[in-house]
Amino acid sequence: MNDIQQASVAAFELLLSGDQTTWEIISLSFSVSLSAIAIASPLALILAFFLAFFQFPLRRALIALFNTFMSVPAVVIGLTLYLLLSRSGPLGELKLLFTDKAMIIGQILLSFPLLVAMAHAAFQAADRRAWETAITLGAKPWRAFFTLMFEVRFGLIAAVVAGFGRVIAEIGCSMMVGGNILHATRNIPTAIALETSKGEFAQGIALGIMLLIMSLSLNAGVSLFQGKGELRA
Amino acid sequence: MSDLIDYHGIKISLSGKLILDIDHLAVKAHQCTLVTGQNGSGKTTLFKIMSGLLRPDSIQVDYQGRQMNWKQAKPVLQRDIIYLHQQPYLFDASVADNVAYGLYRRGESKNSVQKKVFQALDWANLSHLAQRHAKHLSGGEKQRVALTRARILAPSLLLLDEPTASMDNEAKQQTAYLLQRLKEEGVCVVISSHESHTVDHLADHHLCIEHGKITALEPVKQSAKVTVLNHVKNTLSHD
């Protein structure tokens, strides 16, 4: 019990003293995950919209595929990407393995199906009259798309937040394609795993606290946003 | 009276079943056409095709001296014709923002839009609702806002799908009054309605659709219109 208390106190000291290594890990984690979500979201939202609003061959198969990929373990994505990016793999020449870029690619692959599936559900729940009304009032299709996105913004924000939540906390993919290299590819989950395995809990707890704060902030932000919407709606 | 727009060979099938099969449909300029037909007869489908929202299997459109196939006609129809749903959709914004939506899409300046929105709301006697959130309005108010939002864009043709359905008498009266004013302004309107007493007096032509085919398209006799108008006046005075 004493060890936990001491580790917790040390964890707060690490955070409050601005320990360079700890904050570097936090910064890398957020930069990788935010980049992945920023790249994946636009494409995922557009695809989700097409899946919800237009009929085309293989549409149902695609929806089923994304729903299936939503639950693929991160380590499987990591393994696949590792095989592709490794020196003898088809993309080995790009020399991306064990870089933050590889981690971003892995997190894009991880978050994309979740983003598509959740955004698809949001667009499917949208009132089709919203699209038709925007078009009949003279909006170009791309503008009508933005109007529709605004109408279902709560569902879309929930999708993006869920996607971010999945990638910021995943360990399997980052460990395999990032390699957990200090000052280069070590992020919050891989650092927590490493420190815990070494029996040094202070940094692990400090990083865990950061994940918890991030999670609480995101949820509070979304609740506040939705609350404002409910008042207006 | 010359034709505003002519549609030829409208055909559309859904799940292998022919929903609409219309050889020729002419909409007269500055006239009001009342479309009647049972539920499922194809009125809404016809309106969506006429406004460029739904792609038919085949169509030819004559408009402004041009003969167009669907690909050519679609952007023109979407630009010049406005379709109003039976229960109009208002965006998650204020009444003023809803009315302004189409003007902004045309690239008008903020000052010009604000001025036009103010005038349009005044025209519809809706100025007091300008800042009200659109989702808070009653069915009748929503319909009037939607009509105002359509009118402000000065469409060549306005397609109204059951504009007075599911409304109380007062809301019907107010909507019918706005429709009357639109007609007086020379706006070409096509209305589908079961509420014949509410909108019959506006109609210059009566179009009947059954099982996706036009079974009658004829001018409404002036005497019949006067009879209906008197009936409406009597009904309203008793209310």
Image (tube, coloured by chain):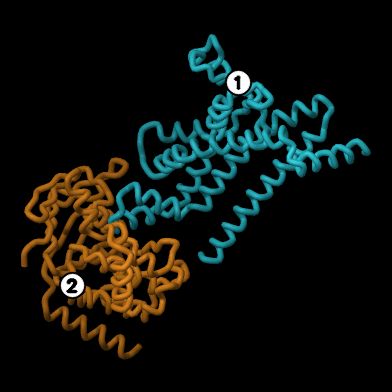
Chain colours: A cyan, B orange
- From this viewpoint, is residue B72 visible? yes
Looking at the image, which residue is at 45% across and 54% down?
Answer: A150
- Give the total number of marks visible in the rendering: 2
Q: Position of residue B31 (x, y in %)?
A: 14, 69
Q: Residues within 10 Å of mark 1 (few under 14, many from 20)?
A: many
Which residue is farthest top? Answer: A88
Q: Chain of mark 1?
A: A
Name the foreground residue: B118 vs A15.
A15
Question: CA separation, marks 1 and 2?
Answer: 74 Å
User: Where residue A98 is drawn, which disc sits there?
Assistant: 1
Above or below, B43 relative to A20: below
Q: Chain of mark 2?
A: B
The kind of residue tagged 2 is Ala
Looking at the image, which residue is at 29% across and 75% down?
Answer: B119
Instruction: Identify the residue position indicated by label 2 in the image.
Output: B203
Question: Is disc 1 placed on a helix, strand or loop?
Answer: loop
Above or below, B20 relative to A70: below
The answer to whether dots 1 and 2 both sit on one chain is: no
Q: Position of residue B184 (x, y in %)?
A: 18, 77
Quarter-wise, where is residue B179 in the image? bottom left
Q: Position of residue B20 (x, y in %)?
A: 22, 50
Q: Residues within 10 Å of mark 2 (few under 14, many from 20)?
A: many
Question: Is disc 2 placed on a helix, strand or loop?
Answer: loop
Which residue is farthest right? Answer: A2
User: Where residue B53 is drawn, which disc sits there?
Assistant: none
- From this viewpoint, is residue B211 visible? no
The kind of residue tagged 1 is Phe
Q: Is residue A45 left or right of residue A34?
A: left
Name the foreground residue: A186 vs B20.
A186
Above or below, B25 relative to A75: below
